Amino acid sequence: MSEFKALVVTEEQGNYVSQVSLRHIDELPPGEVLIRVAYSSLNFKDALSASGNKGVTRNFPHTPGIDAAGVVEASSVAELEVGDEVIVTGYDLGMNTAGGFGQYIRVPAAWVLKRPEGLSLRDSMVLGTAGLTAALCIDKLEQAGLAPGQGPVLVTGATGGVGSIAVAILAGLGYEVAAATGKALQADFLKRLGASLIVDRSALEAGKDKMLLKEQWAGAVDTVGGDILFNVVKSLRYGASVACCGLTAGGQFQASVFPFILRNVNLLGIDSVEQPLVVKASMWDRLSLQWKTDLHSLCHEVSLEELPEQIEKILAGKMIGRVLVNLG
């Protein structure tokens, strides 16, 4: 098969238009591994790419999709054979390399991870970059000393992809989870994932002008950034940490040194894109074994043709849970 379907974003007089088109395999970039994609997932970065954000994607036409799971169709390296089921997340996939919103991708072997035995290809993309990021956050928090029984752990942006998975994993590990959201109608959804406390987003926006806030959180996963992130820092308990992995509320915040030098707290940066493959493999093993949780209730499955509507939805801040893309 030389032709395949892909969501292609084109620039037309300053506007960016997404539509499903036919592409040829020989149009794909060079790489050691050709993969027939079975599933992908929709992330905020994909929506930025599809809307023409030059910080994500420089050149158009382009196929987004920073996640892909599928089967090796051709390989020039011994460690990956035709028929292997594999996962690709991050690196340059879907940014400036044609991504998982196409039925085929061709990538360097150094980006490709064999599917863990405890997850199906579908399971792996219900998780996707969001699940990997959530796992990296929790792992880094635990490395910094977080453990169940220390008090509530806050998750901001809790109805989003990373946030909802973080809530579910933390609850499954025995943590008391406080889920923060601006979507009050989703309280039941978050409680089903395991949240024991729902925090209105407005409560995290108060006190921006203060150097310190009341100590509340034994730890936190922040997916939104902006001034909310620093308010979380200011309300951590003594010696606690927050893992920062998102910027939907902004890429900057007004900061002071007071929480760091008076409460000994830690701001931990999380990147899931350029992590060495061995680190990603370790996190995927956890997600397939001791951190495995049933996430299908938070997953909405769509086709390529339905993706443009979902992209608009995530850009408008209306996405709940995960969007799984079926490329079959």
Image (spheres, rainbow, N blue to C red):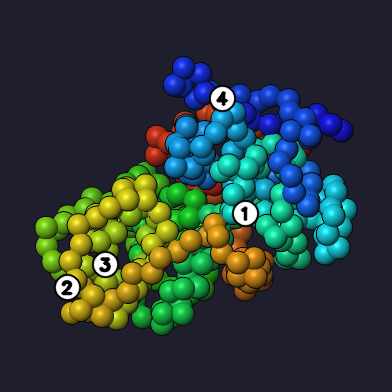
Is 21 in front, or is 191?
A: 21
Tag 4 residue: 10
Give the residue drawn at x 80%, y 29%: 3
Secondary structure of the residue carrying numbered label 1: strand
| The label number, if any, that marks residue 261 in the structure image | none
State the CA–CA distance, disc 1 to disc 3: 29 Å
Q: Is residue 139 left or right of residue 265?
A: right
Secondary structure of the residue carrying numbered label 2: helix
State the CA–CA distance, disc 4 to disc 2: 47 Å
Tag 2 residue: 258
Q: Residues within 10 Å of mark 3 (few under 14, many from 20)?
A: many
Q: Residues within 10 Å of mark 4 (few under 14, many from 20)?
A: many
State the CA–CA distance, disc 4 to disc 3: 41 Å
Tag 3 residue: 233
State the CA–CA distance, disc 1 to disc 4: 23 Å
Q: Residues within 10 Å of mark 2 (few under 14, many from 20)?
A: some
State the CA–CA distance, disc 1 to disc 2: 37 Å
The answer to the question of whether label 3 and label 2 lie on touching residues, with beta carbons closer than 8 A, is: no
In front: mark 1 or mark 3? 1
Nearest to N terminus: mark 4 or mark 2: 4
Give the residue drawn at x 54%, y 57%: 273
Q: In the picture shown, does residue 327 fall above or below 255?
A: above
Nearest to N terminus: mark 1 or mark 3: 1
Q: In the picture shown, does residue 105 fall above or below 287?
A: above
Q: Amino acid at mark 1?
A: Thr
| The label number, if any, that marks residue 89 in the structure image | 1
